[in-house]
Amino acid sequence: MKRIILLTTVVTFASHASAQTGDAPPVDASQLLQSIKQLREVSETAIKNRRNQTFGQISAAAQSAEKAVALWKDAVKAVQFDGAKNEGTAMHNWKEGEGDALGSKLCANAVKLHLQWLALSLQHSNGADTKQLLPQVIEYTKQLQMDTAAIDRLDDQITREHERGGPMQKKNIEDAAVKRMHDQLLRTSINESPVSRWLQLGDLLSEYTRKSKTESAGWEMTPGNMEGIYQTIILPQFRATRDSRLLEYWDMTIKRETERAAERKLDIEQREWTQVKRPALLWARSQDVLLLGFRNRAIGEMFNILKTFPQHPEAQSWVGQLEQLIKSAAPSPALSVPQSAIRSSAPPSAPAATTVPAQTVPPVSAP
């Protein structure tokens, strides 16, 4: 009897399993496709509404340092402490340390800048054209330049206090904490900040998340990377439109790096700037002079760089580029390079001619 019951149970289970693994009844393809279309529209509307709501929230907070810091603190609390072990103690310790530094004017401004860049990035990821956003990006870099100058002054003050020796004063310790927090705020990628994690912006910034490692997204992820913003966003737009502000960029960069080099004390650093880095910047500038259509002027500048720095590591490559440029068309009578100087300064041998690239970007330290 038990065997009959067991057998019946096995047969019933097998029949049920077979029914579960069998195909479902035919579907109404037309009706199903219509439903899928409606689901897509609902999803797109929801994402658009969420994007607009998030952008509005971040833009509103970025209007003032006070609002920016308030949003940042809420985000830190949510992603670092809510639900954590000893939540109250951990939050208290953070407020006494990093949280206290956020109350400084420099750090509050850094938070504001971070949120401004996040808002611009959301606009771009939502389809806003880079050309359309360019005026806002340039205005942002101006604010970033002022912030950089302010934090550099604080850094100089910290350095002077340290060089005096003796025990560190309380103010100097606080200033050092402000400097660390400030730099952290502007060096944190927008898709890794507490605000992005709290508001779950990963999908809205997914394009940048996928491409950030290859630097092919056409956008800079780090709000404090001035050089990255110029190289990735501003300069390509200037070159595409033959904008004369290209030369303003190079003049600004060379001036800034010259000032920094003047502060360096080691002779080897001075020589590296004078003999290697500065000529490379001048050469890169001359290529943009050529791009703007000032061919004769560019040739003259390139020749003077080679004549002044014949032992530069890139000199042979530059010689080939200049030769190719001169051979590509008949020399203009207006060329301001004396023929006697060319004959007397010509190198004994030159490499095969190469095409002048649209741009050669030398390594420049971030502002």
Image (cartoon, grey):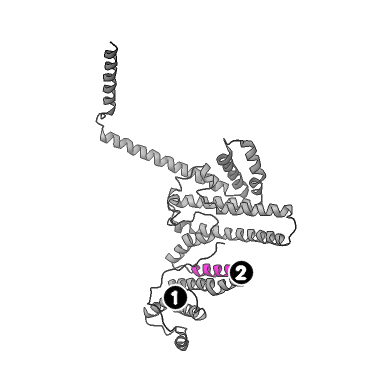
Segment colored magenta: 243-257
Could you tell me the amino acid type at mark 2?
Glu
52 within the magenta span: no
Q: Nearer the viewer, residue 315 or 39?
A: 315
Q: Which residue is mark 1?
A: 318
Residue 60 in the figure: left or right of residue 215: right
Residue 37 visible at all: yes
Badge 2 local density, few (<14 within 10 Å), some, or many (20+)? few
Looking at the picture, how far across and down is residue 87, in whole percent? 61, 36
Residue plotted at (26% across, 35% down)? 29
- Label 1 residue SS: helix
Q: Residue furthest left?
A: 26
Residue 178 in the figure: left or right of residue 51: right
Q: Nearer the viewer, residue 174 or 25?
A: 174
Question: In terms of image quadrants, where is residue 165?
Answer: bottom right
Q: Which residue is mark 2?
A: 259
Residue plotted at (64% across, 59% down)? 150
- How far apart marks 2 and 1 lie (CA) works out to 26 Å
Residue 334's label in the rendered image is: none
- Label 2 residue SS: helix
Predominant SS of the magenta segment: helix
Looking at the picture, how far across and down is residue 152, in whole percent? 63, 61
